Amino acid sequence: MHIRTVKVPSSSGKVNQYVRLVESYRERGKVKQRVIAHLGRKDVLRALLPKLQRVLRAEPTLEGHQEDQIQIVDASTWGPVLLVRRLFDQLGLWKILKEHLGPSRRLPYADRAFVLLANRLIAPASEHGLAGWLETDFVCDRRGRRFLPRWHRRGRVQVHHRQLDAWYRTLDRLLAAKGAIEVALYEQLRDLFSFQPDLVLYDISSTYFEGAGPKDFAKYGYSRDGKPQNVQVIVGVVMVAGWPIAHHVWAGNRLNHSTVEELIQDLRERFEFARVVFVGDRGMVTQGSLDRGS
């Protein structure tokens, strides 16, 4: 292979030189040539030649900088948080949370709730673990201000108590508005995907505590985690058309079947379902339909 320069006149009368990579080959005893690649205009390539040489020599490609002068300021992860933000936008969660969590003197509760939710979707951890995650992932509020951890060692606790209090207050707000948020989100999902709820799927699980757990809720019971020595709570999730629309938390010694009547009553009161088709564990089914009341 070899390089060939070809002169090509332009419409303005100017003659430009183009560089081509040409290969010689033999066909029926005759030597012929064919173009392997058009490399571009010669004057443009001449300007790019120093950069091309640095690439071929595996040298730094930032013009005017040596390798020891290049400093990485930040390399935070951004992509997963963008996906969660897009989910918030499409589901209308900003408006729902703003309406039901109420105002805040400083940072809106909706933005704090976004951080908590994003953390549990991307890298589930406690509020202490959340602080470490904020150092590796770029998470910001709707005004572009980045959330950063505040470290302050006090015994075993390394996160500043004010920051922890802010997360805990947000969780308290979410708990208080849980019922209204679930209904508003269900209505948003129903309108977005135009699904007709004709079947409710309901499942129960348990989660245990290493410590004492919440008073009046943490009890000994049948452990699905194989931890009968630990107190636990029972968690039930309601699914419609593949989407979770509600969840409930009961004391750890609550029997599965005793939660069904309470669940159905909740669906009728909050979601205005007239009748329910219930599918629980062991294949238990209650016949009927799931109609949205007027």
Image (spheres, grey):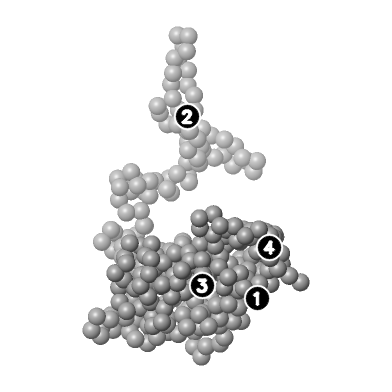
Provide the residue designation for mark 2: 36
The reply, left or right, for residue 204 in relation to residue 14 is left
Q: Nearer the viewer, residue 242 or 291?
A: 291
Single out the residue that lies furthest toward the left.
Answer: 155
Under mark 2, the amino acid is: Ile
Q: CA distance from mark 4 to mark 2?
A: 67 Å
Q: What residue is shown with label 1?
A: 269
- How packed is label 1: few (under 14 Cα within 10 Å), some, or many (20 or more)? few
Q: CA distance from mark 1 to mark 2?
A: 74 Å
Tell me the kind of residue under disc 1. Glu
Q: Determine contact: label 4, label 3, CB under 8 Å.
A: no
Q: Amino acid at mark 3?
A: His
Q: Which mark is residue 290?
A: 4
Q: Nearer the viewer, mark 1 or mark 2?
A: 1
Which residue sits at x=51%, y=32%? 6
Instruction: Return the residue found at the far top.
Output: 29
Q: Residue at x 37, y 65 (%)?
A: 223
Q: Is residue 192 above or below residue 102?
A: above
87, 143: nearer the viewer: 87
Q: Which sits earlier in the primary sequence, circle 4 or circle 1?
A: 1
Using the numbered discs, state the Cα–Cα distance from disc 1 to disc 3 in whole angstroms: 15 Å
Q: Which quarter of the figure is the C terminus placed in?
A: bottom right
Discs 4/2, front: 4
* Quadrant that contains the N terminus: top left
Element marked by disc 2: strand
